[in-house]
Image (cartoon, rainbow, N blue to C red):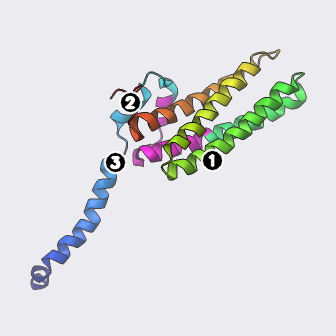
Amino acid sequence: MVAYIKNNFFLVFMIILLFVVPSYARLSMMVTKGEIESICNKKYVDSTLCFEVLKPNPTIAKLDFTGLANFLISYTSRNVSDVLKEVKLYEGNTTDLQTIKLCEEMYDLSLFWDDHALKDLAAKDYDGVNSNVGGTLENMVTCNEELSTMKPVPQSLIAKNNVIKNLSGIVLTILECFIRKGSRLCSH
C-alpha cells in the first residue's frame, strides 16, 4: 500500500484537493457575523428587523450573499402572501373596498415581482432584482398611504406592510453593497 501511495502521490494529492479545496471555498464565501452586522447597521436598513431575521436563523450561517438575498426575497414573498390573506378578510368588513382592492392588486403584483426577482438573482441580472424588489418596496409604501386614509386605520396591516417594505430594503442593501458592490450609498 505504501509503495502504491508513493507511486501515485500525485493522484492522491489531487483527490485530496478535490475534497478539501471546494469545502474551504464554500466556507470562505459564507456571510460572516461581521458582515451581517454590517448589513444590519447600514443607514437605510431597519436594524431591529434585520437582526431579528438574520441572527437567530441557523440556515443563514450556510449562505453566501446571493443565497442570503434569495432567502430574504423568499421570506418577503411569504410575508406578502400572509398579509394578502389577511387583507382579503377586510373585504367584507370595510366601507372602503376600493382601498382594499388596490392593496390586493399590489400584493399580487409584489408576489409576481418577488418570483421574478428570484429568477433574476439566479441569472445574475442584478438590475432586474433591483427593479423587482424595489417594486415590492414601493407597493408597500403606496398601500400604506392608502390604508392610512381608512376609518378606522388598519394599524396592524400598516405594520405588516412596513415589515415587507423593510425586508425589501435589506435585500436591496445586500444587492447594492455586497453583491454588486458599486453603490455610492454603501461604505464598507
Q: Residue at x 90, y 21 (%)?
A: 95
**What crowding class fits label 2: few (fewer than 14 Cα within 10 Å), some (14-19), or many (20 or more)?**
some
* Left or right: 149 as drawn, with respect to 6: right
Dot in front, 3 or 1: 1
**What crowding class fits label 3: few (fewer than 14 Cα within 10 Å), some (14-19), or many (20 or more)?**
few
Dot in front, 3 or 2: 3
Q: According to the image, label 3 marks what residue?
A: 29
Viewer-side residue, 102 vs 17: 102
Q: Residue at x 56, y 48 (%)?
A: 118
- Contact, mark 3 vs mark 2 (Cβ under 8 Å): no
Helix, strand or loop at disc 1? helix
Range drawn in magenta:
50-76
Q: Residue at x 30, y 48 (%)?
A: 28
Magenta span includes 85 = no
Q: Quadrant of residue 39?
A: top left
Helix, strand or loop at disc 3? helix
Q: Give the residue type at disc 1.
A: Asp
Helix, strand or loop at disc 2? helix
Q: Which mark is residue 37?
A: 2
- Quick one: quadrant of the N terminus? bottom left
CA gap between label 3 and label 2 equals 16 Å
CA gap between label 2 and label 1 equals 27 Å
Q: N-terminal of the two: label 3 or label 1?
A: 3
Q: According to the image, label 1 marks what residue?
A: 115
Q: Give the residue type at disc 3.
A: Met
Magenta segment main secondary structure = helix
Q: Give the residue type at disc 2.
A: Glu
Q: Is 37 drawn above or below residue 95 in the view shown?
A: below
CA gap between label 3 and label 1 equals 25 Å
